[in-house]
Every structure is written in C-alpha cells, then in structure tokens.
Image (tube, helix red, strand yellow):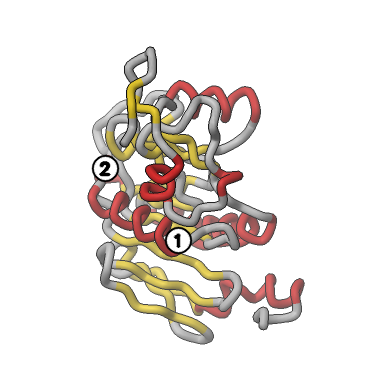
Amino acid sequence: MSTASDAGFPIWTASEVIARFGDIPIARLRTSPPPGEATEADVIELHDRHDRLFELIDGTLVEKAMGWRESYLAAWIATLLNNFVLPRKLGLVLGSDGMFRLERDKIRIPDVAYISKQRFAGRTLKPGAFWELGCDLAVEVISPSNTKREMERKLRDYFAAGVIAVWLVYPKTREVAVYSSATEFVTLGGDDLLDGGAVLPGFSVPVSQIFAELDATEGGVET
C-alpha cells in the first residue's frame, strides 16, 4: 500500500509499479522524479533540454521506445500519408515527436498521427508543447521493448480520447494490425491493402510497400 511523500504525492512500492506498468523494461521508467510525482513540466524539460521523449502516465515518465528501423518506418508512413493528405488539404500529419495531451497529465506520443482539418477548423493554432485537439489516426511502430500490456493500455487511452483508428506496425513480422476499437482489429500482411477506412477514404497502400526498403536493407522478415 502506498504512503504519501512530504509533497503530498503517493510513494509507490515496487509491486504497485509492476501492477501499473507490467513488464515494461525498468530502464524505460524514469525514477527522477519518482513514479507518481512527474508532471507535464518534466516532459517538456526532458524534450527541450535533453532531446528525450517521455510519455506521462499516472504521474510517471515512460521513455518512448524507438530504434533506427522504427524511426525509419514511422518517417516512411508519415511520407505516404502526407502524399495523400497534403494535395487534398485534408489536415495535418505529425511525426514521432508530436506530443498529445489526451487528458490532464496524460501525455501520449504516437509515432505518426493524422489530424483531420475538421478538428481545428476555425481555430487559431498557437505554438505549444502539446497538441490538445485529438487525432483521427494514431500509428505506433512496435519496438522490441514494447510489451503487450503496454500497447493494450495505450489502445484504451487512444480510443477513450476519441481517436478513430490505430495502426500497430510490426517490423519483425512485417504486419500491420488495424484497430477500430481497443479490442477490435484485423491483421494485414504481404500484398494486403492497408486503407484509410472512414478516417482517410481513398487512401490505400500494400503492406509490402511499407516494408519494402526495410526488406532490401535487412534481407527480409526476421526468423
């Protein structure tokens, strides 16, 4: 059972951290400030001063896991989306350091996000650390340190915040899981077409095209 610190924050035990975050590698959980005491200001400081990306969940800083190939795939998917979105003036595509405030003190950082212009039409968009108007599509490229429980919670957070669709991209198996809710999804691979559905009608790309350059670089699917 947690107790309170002098500042009034709960002091978590190791078992409470495990219960909340499951099997996330401990190195991704920042302990300064201690779990349960972190704020949005800490997220901004780490980004601006140290060029590191941390999500904020339950007052805890969880480092965004991303290697070179995850970054490459995210950039390529953003390019594919921009090639469709920009000529049609459909909205905005944000990259892997676009930080979203899903609710007070809950910051998530999708690898790619599409925001339809309907979400910000008529508004004056001002510079800021966090995007607060939600997104229509969130894309997460799964890294080796992402865990099943972690992604299940992230899916719940996205859909609770009004995201319409989430793509989980798996470099290891060269597949994309397309979620229409936190529990409903279809898995695509090979020459299956990944389409924009109700979020981006008319957009489609073979799943194999997403991974084509990675295949050429790495020699195909891992075994």
Q: Does 39 appear above or below 146?
A: above
Instruction: Return the mark for residue 119.
Output: 2
Residue 39: image location, x then y, percent = 41, 25
Q: For the residue marked with disc 2, what is the amino acid? A: Arg
Q: Is residue 72 left or right of residue 16?
A: right
Q: Does 39 appear above or below 94?
A: above
What residue lies at 46% left-to-right and 39% top-to-bottom? Answer: 55
Residue 178: image location, x then y, percent = 37, 70
Q: Which residue is mark 1?
A: 84
Q: Is residue 78 left or right of residue 202?
A: right
Can you tell which quarter of the image residue 185 is in? bottom left
Who is closer to the viewer here, 108 or 198? Answer: 108
- Element at badge 1? helix
Residue 121: image location, x then y, percent = 26, 38
What residue lies at 35% left-to-right and 52% top-to-bottom? Answer: 90
Question: What crowding class fits label 1: few (fewer than 14 Cα within 10 Å), some (14-19), or many (20 or more)?
Answer: some
What residue lies at 45% left-to-right and 49% top-to-bottom? Answer: 110
Residue 41: image location, x then y, percent = 45, 21
